[in-house]
Image: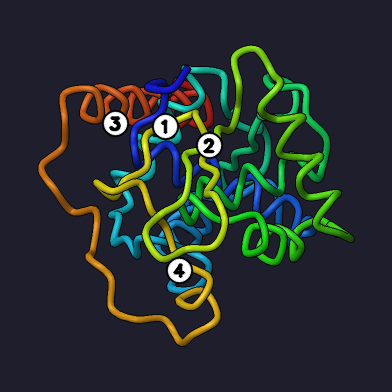
Amino acid sequence: MSSELDPTERRLLGVLIEKQLSTPDAYPLSLNALVLGANQKSCRDPITSYADWEVEGAVTSLCNKKWAMHIEGGRVRRWRHQASEKLGIDKAGLAVLAELLLRGSQQPAELRRNAGRLSPIHSDEEMQAILDQLAAKLPPLVKNIGRAPRERDVRWTQTLAPDELPDGTGLSGAAASAPPSPSPMVGGSTPTPAQLLARIEALEHEVAELKRSLGA
């Protein structure tokens, strides 16, 4: 499972979980909402600049892997995640997983603060219990990666996809509480064959839907 999601898929799965918990009235998400959520400047590390076609290809790939599903009906196509069904975890576990997907590895204290915006986590002991439950899954959904230099506590990371930064670190506690600093922009790169295939599948689906609506 550790290599199942690429960086774009990882970001979109985090966005889908986050928006379900934080703005349920606007969920499931349209393509435009997915693009905005993936590229927003707050609560993200690294900051990205994904194009519409990259996001559409990645969310189609998530559907093929059963991490997301397309919601039929309505004028605008929308998507929802299937992490709850696939992983069998509760709201607090989803909140912690979403924050690790969106920001990278974190210490328990900062993770409790960040995930608490999506689901209340009332104590350090409760935070540790959630991490222990996620780590006890088969296969584990999170893992302890030890202390980074000059940090007081160990870091935890998710196991659904590799951390995007080479050293496996996300925002530190100080960086998380400070104004956002410029981060490397991710996205806009040459598409991989898998991304192109997912994009073709998405376009074929749109053409089929258009033909049905025209009675062709």
Residue at which label 1 appears? 161
Q: Residue at x 43, y 29 (%)?
A: 60
For label 3, the crowd category at 10 Å Cα-Cα, with few meaning under 14, some 14 to 19 and many 20 or more, is many
**N-term-proximal mark, 3 vs 1:** 1
Compared to 190, does 211 lie above or below? above
Q: Are marks 2 and 1 in contact (CB under 8 Å)?
A: yes
Q: Along the line of sight, which residue is nearer the eye, 143 or 114? A: 143
Compared to 93, does 82 lie above or below? above
Q: Are marks 3 and 1 in contact (CB under 8 Å)?
A: no
Please state which amino acid type lies under the numbered disc 2.
Gln
Residue at which label 3 appears? 199
107 sits left or right of 185 in the view: right
Residue at which label 2 appears? 158
Please state which amino acid type lies under the numbered disc 4.
Gln
Q: Along the line of sight, which residue is nearer the eye, 30 or 163? A: 163
Q: Which mark is residue 40?
A: 4
Point out residue 46 in the picture as x, y percentages from the top left corner.
Answer: 35, 60
